Image: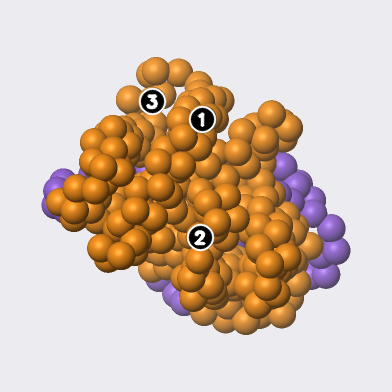
Amino acid sequence: MMPDLWGIAAIVTKFTLYLGVLTAAGTVMAALVFRLERTRGLALAFAALGLVASLIAFSLRGASLTGDASGLTDPEMLALLWSTPVGTALMYRVTGLGLLAVGLFMGKFGKWVCALGGLMAIWSFDHIGHISGRNTALLDIALTLHLVAVALWIGILTPLKRLASRPATYAMAADVGHRFGRVASVAVPALIVMGGYMGYQLVGSFTALIGTAYGQALTIKVALVAGLLVLAAVNKLRFIPELQIGNPVAAGHLVKTISVEWGVILAILGVTAILTSNLTLPT
Amino acid sequence: MKNVLLAGLAGLWATGAIAHSPLDSTTPPHEAVVTEMPTEVQMNFKDDIRLTRVVVTHADTQGTEMDLGDQTTFMQQFTLPMRDMGAGTYVVEWRGLGADGHALNGIFSFTVEQ
């Protein structure tokens, strides 16, 4: 069944929410781990995007309770929502992103405040959705670790692309890329293991994977992630080592690959928004 | 590439189901034909929910919103009074909120033959 206008708005908002929260949290985490400079504007812009999307997503849920626009601002509906885990998730998102934004203006100590805020915003995803519905601590931990790894990956992309775009910072780009590659060699397998575990718990069988819309969407997501891994491997094994020995052509390739990586990540977030909004779990 | 993705997403929408519909049973049952107009309808859900809107449409008339009373807790069973609008098909469209925060909705109908 095609989603109605409210359903489409919910998917678009959720996509924006994922993009905002994960990029803001990832940027501040990457800045902390890889000692990156000049990331404040980027983190602030995506934190604002995540904050706006969080509020709109909450309001849209109000509309789904009445079936029309009156629910967007209906105090009774919104108060009712606030009393459920949806309200708890909103509280974590707003507090986390607010903390992240404040931390951006707090100097050296602020980096830790930002990271704490980012983690809090990511933690909000453990309170609603298919994973929280299962009520198991192991799945909650898997989701959090999965999202932290995804955020870190997303967070490194734009700063690395910026460094690889100017000859004066080629060496720094090579260094950051190399250090990220080392972190990724642990974080990416963890991301895949956690994603695989959650996928198995939610879908349950190979028949459901190929025979249900949810399973098919998950398969598309996995295929996109596989494509992303190939791009990341090319960066790690080819362009970063070449940049380390001062090959300027490698910088251009790295910039292009990161742009493609961004495109694939947007597609993954889009499929995830459909998975979590419009499709029911296989039974 | 873009077209392939779009086609894939359209396919997902075509086979997907909207959200959750945990209505266990109704009185009168869905698509039942009854000879007497019921004075009330009963909805039994699998889990606790709060009803947020119920609209009844009779034949081709405009939908009438039902009074849901003062609900204070999440419940599984709801009994709502029905207004007799004559013979024909009654369609009951409901919306609600699950205790886990999920928005829920669904439709059931019955026909009165007199």
Q: Chain of mark 1?
A: A
Q: Secondary structure at mark 3?
A: helix
- For label 1, the residue is A186
Residue A62 shows up from this direction = no
Same subunit, tags 2 and 1: yes
Q: Amino acid at mark 2?
A: Leu
- For label 3, the residue is A209
- For label 2, the residue is A36
Farthest residue to the front: give it. Answer: A245
- Front in this rendered view, residue A125 or B60: A125
Label number found at residue A136: none
Foreground label between 3 and 1 = 1
Q: Position of residue A8 (x, y in %)?
A: 39, 63
Q: Amino acid at mark 1?
A: Val
Residue B72 shows up from this direction = yes
**Given contact means CB atoms under 8 Å apart, are the residues at marks 2 and 1 in contact?**
no
Q: Chain of mark 3?
A: A
- Front in this rendered view, residue A56 or A142: A142
| B81 relative to A216, above or below | below
**Cα–Cα span, label 2 and label 1:** 20 Å
**Cα–Cα span, label 3 and label 1:** 27 Å
Give the colour of chain A.
orange
Give the colour of chain B.
purple
**Given contact means CB atoms under 8 Å apart, are the residues at marks 2 and 3 in contact?**
no
Q: Name the side, left or right, on which A268 lies relative to B11.
A: right
Q: Chain of mark 2?
A: A
- Badge 3 crowding class, 10 Å Cα cut-off, few under 14, some 14 to 19, many 20 or more, is many
